[in-house]
Amino acid sequence: MRTDPESFVRANTGILMPPHVPEIRLHLASEAHELWLKTEEELEQIGLPPPFWAFAWAGGQGLARFILDHPETVRGRRVVDFASGSGLVAIAAKMAGADEVVAADIDPWCETAARLNAELNGVSLAFAAADIVGSERAADVYLAGDVFYDKSFAALLLPWFDALERAGAVVLVGDPGRAYCPRERMTPLATYEVPVTRALEDCEVKRTTVWRFGQAAS
Ligand SMILES: C[S@@+](CC[C@H](N)C(=O)[O-])C[C@H]1O[C@@H](n2cnc3c(N)ncnc32)[C@H](O)[C@@H]1O
Protein backbone atom coordinates (compact mmCIF):
# COMPACT_ATOMS: atom_id res chain seq x y z
CA MET A 1 0.00 0.00 0.00
CA ARG A 2 1.37 3.41 -0.97
CA THR A 3 1.11 6.11 1.66
CA ASP A 4 0.84 9.78 0.98
CA PRO A 5 4.36 11.18 1.65
CA GLU A 6 3.28 14.01 3.90
CA SER A 7 1.24 11.74 6.20
CA PHE A 8 4.12 9.25 6.21
CA VAL A 9 6.71 11.85 7.22
CA ARG A 10 4.46 13.26 9.94
CA ALA A 11 3.57 9.80 11.30
CA ASN A 12 7.14 8.50 11.40
CA THR A 13 9.03 11.46 12.81
CA GLY A 14 8.92 13.92 15.65
CA ILE A 15 9.91 17.57 15.70
CA LEU A 16 13.45 17.66 17.04
CA MET A 17 16.42 20.02 17.05
CA PRO A 18 19.66 18.64 15.54
CA PRO A 19 22.02 18.89 18.56
CA HIS A 20 24.70 20.93 16.76
CA VAL A 21 22.17 23.30 15.12
CA PRO A 22 19.51 23.88 17.80
CA GLU A 23 18.19 26.98 15.98
CA ILE A 24 16.60 24.68 13.41
CA ARG A 25 13.72 22.27 13.98
CA LEU A 26 13.22 19.26 11.75
CA HIS A 27 10.93 16.28 11.34
CA LEU A 28 13.41 13.58 12.41
CA ALA A 29 13.17 9.90 13.28
CA SER A 30 14.36 8.80 16.68
CA GLU A 31 14.32 5.53 18.59
CA ALA A 32 10.72 6.41 19.43
CA HIS A 33 9.67 5.95 15.81
CA GLU A 34 9.05 2.72 13.97
CA LEU A 35 10.97 3.99 10.93
CA TRP A 36 14.14 3.75 12.96
CA LEU A 37 13.69 0.00 13.36
CA LYS A 38 12.68 -0.94 9.82
CA THR A 39 15.17 -2.90 7.73
CA GLU A 40 16.02 -1.93 4.15
CA GLU A 41 13.87 -4.85 2.87
CA GLU A 42 10.84 -3.70 4.85
CA LEU A 43 11.32 -0.20 3.53
CA GLU A 44 11.54 -1.48 -0.04
CA GLN A 45 8.19 -3.21 0.41
CA ILE A 46 6.52 0.11 1.15
CA GLY A 47 8.39 1.77 -1.73
CA LEU A 48 10.73 3.78 0.46
CA PRO A 49 14.46 4.16 -0.19
CA PRO A 50 16.61 4.32 2.99
CA PRO A 51 15.20 7.41 4.74
CA PHE A 52 18.25 9.68 4.66
CA TRP A 53 15.81 12.59 4.99
CA ALA A 54 14.76 11.42 8.48
CA PHE A 55 18.18 12.09 10.03
CA ALA A 56 20.40 15.16 10.42
CA TRP A 57 23.74 13.70 9.30
CA ALA A 58 26.93 14.88 10.96
CA GLY A 59 28.26 16.44 7.74
CA GLY A 60 25.07 18.42 7.28
CA GLN A 61 25.02 19.54 10.91
CA GLY A 62 28.60 20.81 10.66
CA LEU A 63 27.93 22.61 7.40
CA ALA A 64 24.67 24.16 8.66
CA ARG A 65 26.52 25.35 11.82
CA PHE A 66 29.22 26.94 9.64
CA ILE A 67 26.66 28.73 7.44
CA LEU A 68 24.72 30.12 10.41
CA ASP A 69 27.95 31.31 12.06
CA HIS A 70 29.35 32.76 8.79
CA PRO A 71 26.27 34.12 7.02
CA GLU A 72 28.43 36.18 4.67
CA THR A 73 29.24 32.89 2.92
CA VAL A 74 25.76 32.79 1.40
CA ARG A 75 24.14 36.19 2.03
CA GLY A 76 22.61 37.56 -1.16
CA ARG A 77 23.88 34.59 -3.16
CA ARG A 78 22.20 31.85 -5.19
CA VAL A 79 22.76 28.62 -3.35
CA VAL A 80 22.32 24.92 -4.14
CA ASP A 81 22.17 22.47 -1.22
CA PHE A 82 23.25 19.34 -3.06
CA ALA A 83 22.09 15.95 -1.61
CA SER A 84 19.86 17.89 0.71
CA GLY A 85 18.19 15.03 2.63
CA SER A 86 16.05 16.69 5.31
CA GLY A 87 16.83 20.13 3.86
CA LEU A 88 18.84 21.09 6.96
CA VAL A 89 21.68 22.87 5.13
CA ALA A 90 19.30 24.57 2.68
CA ILE A 91 17.25 25.91 5.60
CA ALA A 92 20.42 27.21 7.30
CA ALA A 93 21.39 28.97 4.05
CA LYS A 94 17.99 30.62 3.75
CA MET A 95 18.07 31.67 7.42
CA ALA A 96 21.54 33.15 6.85
CA GLY A 97 20.19 35.41 4.10
CA ALA A 98 20.81 33.54 0.85
CA ASP A 99 18.93 35.07 -2.03
CA GLU A 100 17.51 31.85 -3.39
CA VAL A 101 18.13 28.31 -2.28
CA VAL A 102 17.53 25.13 -4.24
CA ALA A 103 17.53 21.88 -2.26
CA ALA A 104 18.55 19.11 -4.68
CA ASP A 105 18.13 15.42 -3.99
CA ILE A 106 17.28 12.45 -6.21
CA ASP A 107 15.16 10.85 -3.47
CA PRO A 108 11.62 12.18 -4.08
CA TRP A 109 10.74 11.72 -0.39
CA CYS A 110 13.22 14.49 0.38
CA GLU A 111 11.01 17.00 -1.40
CA THR A 112 8.21 16.45 1.10
CA ALA A 113 10.58 16.35 4.09
CA ALA A 114 12.40 19.51 2.98
CA ARG A 115 9.13 21.37 2.37
CA LEU A 116 7.70 20.42 5.78
CA ASN A 117 10.99 21.27 7.47
CA ALA A 118 11.25 24.62 5.68
CA GLU A 119 7.71 25.44 6.84
CA LEU A 120 8.64 24.58 10.43
CA ASN A 121 11.41 27.17 10.26
CA GLY A 122 9.45 29.85 8.42
CA VAL A 123 11.47 29.77 5.20
CA SER A 124 10.73 28.62 1.68
CA LEU A 125 12.95 26.55 -0.59
CA ALA A 126 12.88 25.45 -4.20
CA PHE A 127 13.46 21.73 -4.77
CA ALA A 128 15.25 19.98 -7.66
CA ALA A 129 14.51 16.28 -7.98
CA ALA A 130 16.61 15.82 -11.12
CA ASP A 131 20.14 14.42 -10.88
CA ILE A 132 22.22 17.58 -11.25
CA VAL A 133 25.62 15.89 -10.93
CA GLY A 134 27.71 17.07 -13.89
CA SER A 135 25.44 19.98 -14.76
CA GLU A 136 26.86 23.42 -15.51
CA ARG A 137 27.25 26.03 -12.81
CA ALA A 138 23.82 27.50 -11.98
CA ALA A 139 24.50 29.04 -8.55
CA ASP A 140 27.16 31.02 -6.69
CA VAL A 141 27.56 28.60 -3.79
CA TYR A 142 27.15 24.80 -3.70
CA LEU A 143 26.80 23.15 -0.30
CA ALA A 144 27.21 19.41 0.16
CA GLY A 145 26.66 17.81 3.57
CA ASP A 146 27.84 14.24 4.08
CA VAL A 147 28.22 13.09 0.48
CA PHE A 148 31.47 11.11 0.54
CA TYR A 149 30.12 7.87 2.01
CA ASP A 150 30.12 5.87 -1.24
CA LYS A 151 33.03 5.20 -3.60
CA SER A 152 31.21 5.47 -6.93
CA PHE A 153 29.21 8.53 -5.80
CA ALA A 154 32.46 10.23 -4.71
CA ALA A 155 34.04 9.42 -8.09
CA LEU A 156 31.19 11.27 -9.83
CA LEU A 157 31.32 14.24 -7.49
CA LEU A 158 35.05 14.99 -7.74
CA PRO A 159 35.15 16.09 -11.40
CA TRP A 160 31.85 17.94 -11.01
CA PHE A 161 32.94 19.90 -7.93
CA ASP A 162 36.21 20.61 -9.71
CA ALA A 163 34.38 21.98 -12.77
CA LEU A 164 32.02 24.09 -10.64
CA GLU A 165 34.93 25.56 -8.75
CA ARG A 166 36.80 26.35 -11.99
CA ALA A 167 33.62 28.02 -13.28
CA GLY A 168 33.74 30.38 -10.28
CA ALA A 169 31.39 28.72 -7.78
CA VAL A 170 32.28 28.23 -4.13
CA VAL A 171 31.83 24.56 -3.17
CA LEU A 172 31.64 23.82 0.56
CA VAL A 173 31.57 20.30 1.94
CA GLY A 174 30.68 19.12 5.46
CA ASP A 175 32.34 15.79 6.19
CA PRO A 176 32.67 13.68 9.34
CA GLY A 177 35.65 11.63 8.11
CA ARG A 178 33.84 9.48 5.53
CA ALA A 179 36.02 6.99 3.68
CA TYR A 180 35.93 8.67 0.26
CA CYS A 181 36.36 12.29 1.31
CA PRO A 182 39.07 13.83 -0.92
CA ARG A 183 40.79 15.79 1.86
CA GLU A 184 43.87 16.42 -0.30
CA ARG A 185 41.72 18.39 -2.77
CA MET A 186 40.20 20.73 -0.19
CA THR A 187 41.00 23.43 2.36
CA PRO A 188 39.67 23.09 5.94
CA LEU A 189 37.61 26.04 7.20
CA ALA A 190 36.27 24.81 10.55
CA THR A 191 36.09 21.65 12.65
CA TYR A 192 33.31 20.72 15.07
CA GLU A 193 32.51 17.92 17.48
CA VAL A 194 29.02 16.92 16.35
CA PRO A 195 26.82 14.77 18.62
CA VAL A 196 25.38 11.83 16.66
CA THR A 197 23.33 8.72 17.34
CA ARG A 198 25.20 5.59 18.29
CA ALA A 199 22.73 3.40 16.39
CA LEU A 200 23.57 5.20 13.12
CA GLU A 201 27.25 5.99 13.50
CA ASP A 202 28.50 3.59 16.14
CA CYS A 203 29.81 6.50 18.21
CA GLU A 204 28.42 9.47 20.09
CA VAL A 205 30.42 12.33 18.61
CA LYS A 206 31.77 12.76 15.09
CA ARG A 207 34.59 15.20 14.42
CA THR A 208 33.26 17.04 11.40
CA THR A 209 35.15 19.39 9.11
CA VAL A 210 33.80 22.02 6.77
CA TRP A 211 35.99 22.15 3.71
CA ARG A 212 36.23 24.44 0.73
CA PHE A 213 36.71 22.39 -2.38
CA GLY A 214 39.71 23.26 -4.52
CA GLN A 215 41.59 26.49 -4.01
CA ALA A 216 42.87 27.65 -0.64
CA ALA A 217 40.38 29.61 1.44
CA SER A 218 40.75 33.38 1.10
C1 LIG B 1 23.98 11.03 4.08
S1 LIG B 1 22.63 11.87 3.30
C2 LIG B 1 23.03 13.57 3.64
C3 LIG B 1 21.80 14.44 3.73
C4 LIG B 1 22.04 15.87 4.20
N1 LIG B 1 22.92 16.59 3.31
C5 LIG B 1 22.60 15.87 5.62
O1 LIG B 1 23.82 16.07 5.78
O2 LIG B 1 21.83 15.65 6.57
C6 LIG B 1 23.04 11.70 1.57
C7 LIG B 1 21.96 12.22 0.61
O3 LIG B 1 22.48 12.13 -0.73
C8 LIG B 1 21.40 11.94 -1.60
N2 LIG B 1 21.91 11.58 -2.93
C9 LIG B 1 22.50 10.42 -3.32
N3 LIG B 1 22.81 10.49 -4.64
C10 LIG B 1 22.42 11.72 -5.09
C11 LIG B 1 22.47 12.40 -6.34
N4 LIG B 1 23.00 11.85 -7.44
N5 LIG B 1 21.98 13.65 -6.41
C12 LIG B 1 21.44 14.25 -5.32
N6 LIG B 1 21.36 13.65 -4.11
C13 LIG B 1 21.85 12.41 -3.99
C14 LIG B 1 20.59 10.88 -0.87
O4 LIG B 1 19.27 10.76 -1.39
C15 LIG B 1 20.66 11.42 0.56
O5 LIG B 1 19.55 12.26 0.84
Image: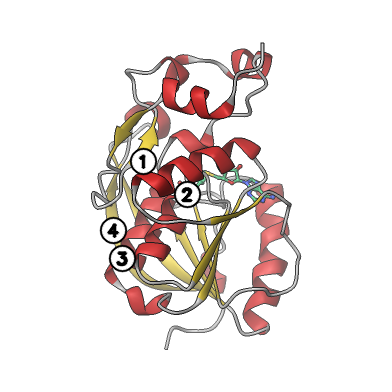
Q: Earlier in the sequence, mark 4 or mark 3?
A: 3
Q: Label 1, on which residue?
A: 26
User: Hey, what amino acid is under mark 3?
Assistant: Leu
Q: If you read the primary sequence from the N terminus, does the residue marked by circle 1 or circle 2 appear first?
A: 1
Q: Residue at x 70, y 67 (%)?
A: 160
Look at the numbered disc 3 and give the secondary structure of its residue. helix
Q: CA distance from mark 4 to mark 3?
A: 14 Å
- Cβ–Cβ under 8 Å for marks 4 and 2: no
Separation of disc 2 and disc 3 at Cα? 14 Å
Circle 2 sits on which residue?
87
- Label 4 SS: strand
Question: As displayed, is residue 157 above or below residue 188?
Answer: above
Mark 3 or mark 1, which is nearer the start of the sequence? 1
- At horizontal 44% and vertical 71% (from top left) the residue drawn is 98
User: Which residue lies under the disc numbered 4?
Assistant: 192
C-beta proximity under 8 Å, tags 1 and 2: yes
- Between the residue at mark 4 and the residue at mark 1, the CA separation in whole angstroms equals 20 Å
Residue 185 has which mark?
none
Q: Position of residue 87 (x, y in %)?
A: 47, 49
Distance from disc 1 to disc 3, alpha carbons, whole Å, reads 16 Å
The residue under label 2 is which amino acid type?
Gly
